[in-house]
Image (tube, rainbow, N blue to C red):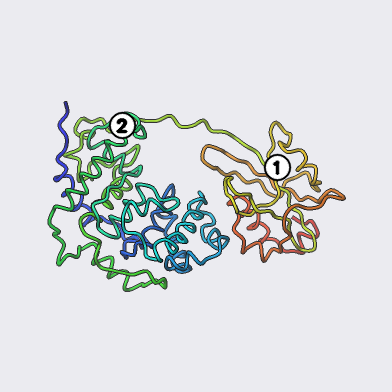
């Protein structure tokens, strides 16, 4: 039976490492739970470098929970446009309204209360409670699970119930050990946090999130250290073990079996799909439609389109409403959604005679204000590069 690493020693090493190597991220300049919650939602399935400008723009537009609760759903989606997984934005909006209604506008400060909110699960609740409130709440995302799998030598499918609960147990043990360690920061303030505060003072943003020089205490820093280690050092394929503060305590490193942990899980088979979109112009306005609820990209806007299988439309009745004017597509877009690799071809088209359009006629100026699915947003970008005069003359 392999010996397990000492959790107190692990916690101490993680805290020391984080003091020296924590990145200066904008949401680390505040203990405002709302701001931290928004960052955690945006960071799901999305890289930090992508999230930063979205988070900063969001906080300028919607600086507190009341502003989000009062906002129009379409404006929320517009702020989120391009981040993908739009259910995150819809859930955040619904959660804000729930906080106003049930919690009198005060952000919940317990894991149980946070888990009552739409789109908030065990991980997000633990992240907010530990980072914003310095509570000993465990976290377990993909990065943390990978770190713990290697440190403790836990094989098998990390998503299986038994193994997942083992990982949660280790995560809880570590944050509890961190809680019991003395806070060695100068006057309760870390060197890292002081530097972050100093940097922030020199370039203060316009959003009104509460700023602080205090990085939140040991529980906050321990969980952030675990996430940071997984993001920067304990990479999936090429972990930088020589730079890892836990290398001497890590089972995978000491047994030279880094590639064995965590167990590789077969990826879903890639499925290719093809869609044709119809660009219909009438009186300097374009025909667009809103996607229905309970589908991918629900409530976002798009140009009329139809899926093609083996060269034929899946919905021939819809396709029959449009007459393609030119054989060559104006634009061909390749994009991915989960396991799907999607090709979207955009054609100039007219409505068949006598067909009543289903959708809304919108000017190019107004199109820029609506939230569009990412592929269809590229169509608008193309249109913005071409004058209305060119479009009306079919000069592409």
Is residue 165 toward the left or the right of residue 47 in the image? left
Rendered residue at 21%/59% (across/down): 217
Q: Residue 395: where, in percent of width, then height?
A: 77, 57
Q: Secondary structure at mark 1?
A: strand
Judge the density around disc 1: few (<14), some (14-19), many (≥20) Cα neighbours within 10 Å: many
Is residue 352 toward the left or the right of residue 258 in the image? right
What residue did someone put label 1 on? 306
Judge the density around disc 2: few (<14), some (14-19), many (≥20) Cα neighbours within 10 Å: few
Rendered residue at 56%/38% (across/down): 340
Per the model, the C-alpha gap separating discs 2 and 1 is 44 Å
Where, by quadrant of the figure, is residue 318 drawn?
A: top right
Where, by quadrant of the figure, is residue 243 drawn?
A: top left
Q: Secondary structure at mark 2?
A: helix
Which quadrant is the N terminus positioned in?
top left
Q: Residue 259: where, in percent of width, then height?
A: 31, 31
- Of residue 41 and residue 256, the one placed in the foreground of this image is 41
Rendered residue at 35%/30% (across/down): 157
- Marks 2 and 1: CB-CB under 8 Å? no
Reply above or below: 197 against 7: below
Is residue 24 toward the left or the right of residue 324 in the image? left
Rendered residue at 23%/37% (across/down): 151
- Of residue 285 and residue 344, the one placed in the foreground of this image is 285
What residue did someone put label 2 on? 162
Q: Residue 146: where, in percent of width, then height?
A: 31, 39
């Amino acid at each position: 039976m392999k010996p397990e690493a000492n959790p107190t020693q692990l916690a101490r090493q993680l805290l020391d490492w984080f003091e020296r190597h924590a990145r200066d991220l904008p949401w680390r300049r505040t203990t405002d739970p709302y701001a931290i919650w928004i960052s955690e939602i945006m960071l799901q399935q999305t890289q930090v470098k992508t999230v930063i400008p979205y988070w900063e723009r969001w906080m300028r537009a919607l600086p507190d929970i009341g502003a989000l609760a009062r906002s129009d759903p379409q404006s929320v989606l517009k702020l989120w446009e391009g981040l993908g997984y739009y259910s995150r934005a819809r859930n955040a909006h619904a959660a804000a309204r729930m906080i106003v209604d049930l919690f009198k506008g005060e952000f919940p400060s317990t894991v149980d209360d946070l888990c009552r909110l739409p789109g908030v699960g065990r991980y997000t609740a633990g992240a907010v409670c530990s980072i914003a409130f310095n509570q000993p709440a465990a976290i377990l995302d993909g990065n943390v699970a990978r770190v713990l799998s290697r440190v403790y030598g836990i094989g098998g499918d990390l998503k299986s119930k038994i193994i997942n609960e083992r990982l949660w147990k280790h995560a809880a043990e570590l944050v509890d050990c961190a809680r019991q360690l003395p806070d060695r920061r100068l006057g309760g303030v870390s060197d890292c946090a002081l530097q972050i505060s100093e940097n922030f003072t020199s370039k203060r943003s316009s959003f009104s999130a509460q700023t602080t020089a205090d990085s939140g205490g040991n529980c906050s820093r321990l969980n952030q250290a675990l996430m940071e280690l997984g993001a920067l050092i304990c990479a999936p394929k090429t972990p930088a073990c020589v730079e890892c503060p836990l290398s001497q305590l890590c089972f995978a490193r000491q047994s030279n079996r880094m590639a064995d942990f965590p167990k590789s899980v077969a990826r879903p088979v890639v499925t290719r799909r093809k869609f044709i979109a119809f660009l219909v112009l009438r009186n300097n306005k374009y025909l667009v439609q809103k996607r229905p609820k309970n589908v991918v990209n629900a409530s976002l806007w798009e140009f009329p389109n139809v899926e093609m299988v083996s060269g034929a439309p899946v919905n021939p009745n819809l396709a029959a409403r449009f007459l393609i004017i030119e054989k060559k597509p104006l634009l061909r877009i390749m994009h991915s959604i989960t396991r799907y690799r999607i090709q979207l071809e955009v054609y100039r088209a007219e409505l068949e005679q006598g067909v009543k359009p289903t959708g809304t006629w919108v000017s190019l100026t107004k199109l820029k204000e609506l939230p569009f699915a990412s592929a269809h947003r590229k169509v608008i970008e193309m249109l913005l590069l071409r004058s209305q005069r060119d479009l009306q003359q079919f000069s592409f």
